[in-house]
Image: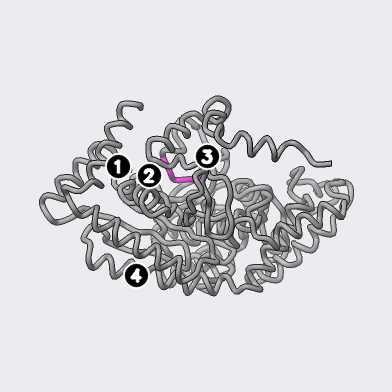
């Protein structure tokens, strides 16, 4: 018997924005409409989205890093269908699932060092929450150090180690004794840890807000300081893990093993929410240290068979198709191409990247006319300039991207790891055109973004 749900879905596609305006988040609807992102996508495959008008859009956002293997990967879909057809006994709760054991085994095999104890979650922020709890219990200390520009999620515990003011506002008081230090600053970290009372230092191996890459030697220095002062090292690879940086895990570039590794997003294959905390058996044993404490931390849906099957299928694709290696190659091509464009266009000041997490940094121009317009835009709104890049990328070139964080003047790209040379060429050609227009003070790009600033101010 076929359901009517997909039939109704197809019939009501045009109503998507009105439904969200009425029942979900009307302010986000307004944002999308103001910046021209109201495309109404109706299907997707691989690296491309298709909108209601049949236009194909190259997805260089990939759901903020969810679709590492591409959208609607047929193998993941096949495994999920087979799992449904198998009518597995999922979520019995007072039993143990084979599927979750298989995925835990696989994660232990690919994780760095002796990380082999796995706790499954439903999301990245839940993984961070769990890792903070594990670190507190295993270390016997409640203080946590995190980094400036950090993003670790938006639930209350993860928000306490989230350094973004725009998210923290209106949520205080947050967890006490959570102190920020600059990223890539070992001296500041040692000053924070030297009292011997910090339970954990949590960091993104590659920072998503701004795409900041650790200096060579930084992570090893972090490892040494954590060992010296008895602090547990938590690597948040929710966005930068699972092949995105050119290796399965970003920490693998520097040969460093954290005490706890948090992953999510891409592990899902883009179908079913899933995440994991991977740690050592020693740390895990300090939390779950008796039969009475076998539920010292738990959730309802973490080990559901569909999520576990999606994770197994995703890892199989990443390994079989050498997607981490492809991410490294395509990322090198994009960075090299953008660095050449930086030589042509003065406002593109830096290109930062590791594999296919890449930040395009813009800065104040030297030429007088451009400088005046730059200052005017930033006086109106700190985030306006980057829309001069992302809006025409979508409107004119059908490439989806977005800013890397509030007030950073950085555009971030996160393509699926299976993009090819043709996709890279298309992106580089489009960026050349967009940057050329952005450097014409009398061009349409400046007028468009100034008008955007005025409209935003009026509707605020």
Residue marked by disc 2: 406
Residue marked by disc 4: 337
Q: Are marks 1 and 2 in contact (CB under 8 Å)?
A: yes
Q: How packed is label 4: few (under 14 Cα within 10 Å), some, or many (20 or more)? A: some
Q: How packed is label 2: few (under 14 Cα within 10 Å), some, or many (20 or more)? A: some
| Count of marks placed on residues | 4
Task: Report if residue 162 lies within the magenta region.
Answer: yes
Q: Residue at x 60, y 50 (%)?
A: 124
Q: Are marks 3 and 2 in contact (CB under 8 Å)?
A: no
- N-terminal of the pair, mark 3 or mark 1, is 3
**Residue 87 versus residue 221 in the image, above or below:** above
Q: Residue 391 location in percent, x, y? A: 36, 47
Q: Is residue 34 left or right of residue 69?
A: left
User: Can I make out residue 233 in this image?
Assistant: no
- N-terminal of the pair, mark 3 or mark 2, is 3
Q: Residue 59 location in percent, x, y? A: 49, 55
In three-dimensional space, the C-alpha distance between marks 4 and 1, rounded to whole angstroms, equals 27 Å
Q: How packed is label 1: few (under 14 Cα within 10 Å), some, or many (20 or more)? A: some
Residue marked by disc 1: 382
In three-dimensional space, the C-alpha distance between marks 3 and 1, rounded to whole angstroms, equals 30 Å
- N-terminal of the pair, mark 4 or mark 3, is 3
- N-terminal of the pair, mark 4 or mark 1, is 4
Q: Quadrant of the C terminus?
A: top left
Magenta stretch, residue numbers: 160-165
In three-dimensional space, the C-alpha distance between marks 3 and 2, rounded to whole angstroms, equals 25 Å
Tag shown at residue 176: 3
- N-terminal of the pair, mark 1 or mark 2, is 1
In three-dimensional space, the C-alpha distance between marks 2 and 4, rounded to whole angstroms, equals 26 Å
Q: Residue at x 35, y 72 (%)?
A: 336
* SS under mark 4: helix
Name the front one of labels 3 and 2.
2
Q: Is residue 207 left or right of residue 142?
A: left
């Amino acid at each position: 018997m076929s359901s009517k749900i997909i039939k109704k879905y197809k019939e009501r596609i045009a109503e998507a924005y009105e439904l969200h305006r009425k029942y979900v988040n009307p302010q986000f609807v307004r944002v999308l409409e103001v910046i021209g992102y109201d495309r109404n996508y109706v299907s997707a495959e691989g690296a491309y989205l298709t909108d209601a008008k049949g236009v194909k859009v190259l997805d260089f956002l990939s759901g903020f890093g969810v679709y590492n293997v591409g959208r609607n990967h047929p193998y993941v879909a096949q495994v999920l269908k087979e799992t449904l057809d198998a009518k597995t006994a999922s979520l019995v709760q007072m039993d143990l699932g084979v599927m979750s054991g298989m995925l835990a085994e696989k994660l232990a095999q690919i994780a760095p060092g002796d990380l082999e104890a796995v706790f499954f979650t439903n999301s990245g922020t839940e993984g961070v929450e769990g890792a903070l709890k594990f670190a507190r219990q295993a270390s016997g200390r409640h203080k946590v150090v995190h980094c400036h520009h950090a993003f670790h999620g938006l639930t209350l515990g993860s928000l306490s180690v989230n350094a973004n003011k725009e998210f923290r506002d209106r949520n205080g008081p947050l967890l006490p004794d959570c102190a920020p230090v600059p990223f890539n600053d070992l001296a500041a970290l040692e000053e924070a840890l030297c009292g011997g009372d910090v339970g954990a230092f949590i960091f993104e191996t590659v920072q998503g807000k701004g795409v900041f890459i650790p200096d060579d030697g930084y992570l090893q220095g972090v490892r040494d300081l954590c060992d010296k002062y008895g602090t547990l090292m938590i690597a948040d690879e929710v966005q930068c893990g699972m092949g995105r940086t050119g290796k399965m895990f970003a920490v693998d570039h520097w040969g460093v093993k954290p005490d706890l590794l948090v992953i999510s997003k891409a592990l899902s294959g883009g179908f079913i929410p899933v995440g994991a905390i991977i740690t050592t058996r020693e740390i895990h044993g300090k939390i779950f240290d008796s039969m009475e404490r076998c539920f010292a931390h738990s959730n309802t849906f973490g080990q559901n068979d569909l999520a576990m099957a999606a994770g197994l299928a995703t890892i199989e694709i990443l390994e079989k198709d050498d997607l981490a290696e492809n991410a490294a190659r395509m990322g090198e091509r994009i960075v090299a191409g953008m660095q050449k464009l930086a030589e042509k266009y003065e406002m593109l000041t830096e290109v930062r990247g590791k594999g296919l997490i890449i930040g395009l940094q813009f800065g104040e121009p030297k030429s007088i006319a451009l400088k005046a317009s730059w200052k005017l835009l930033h006086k109106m709104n700190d985030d306006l300039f980057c829309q001069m890049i992302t809006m025409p990328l979508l409107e004119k070139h059908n490439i989806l991207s977005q800013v890397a964080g509030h007030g950073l003047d950085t555009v971030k790209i996160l393509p699926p790891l299976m993009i090819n040379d043709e996709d890279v060429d298309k992106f580089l050609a489009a960026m050349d055109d967009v940057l050329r227009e952005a450097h014409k003070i009398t061009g349409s790009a400046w007028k468009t973004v100034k008008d955007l600033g005025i409209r935003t101010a009026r509707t605020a």
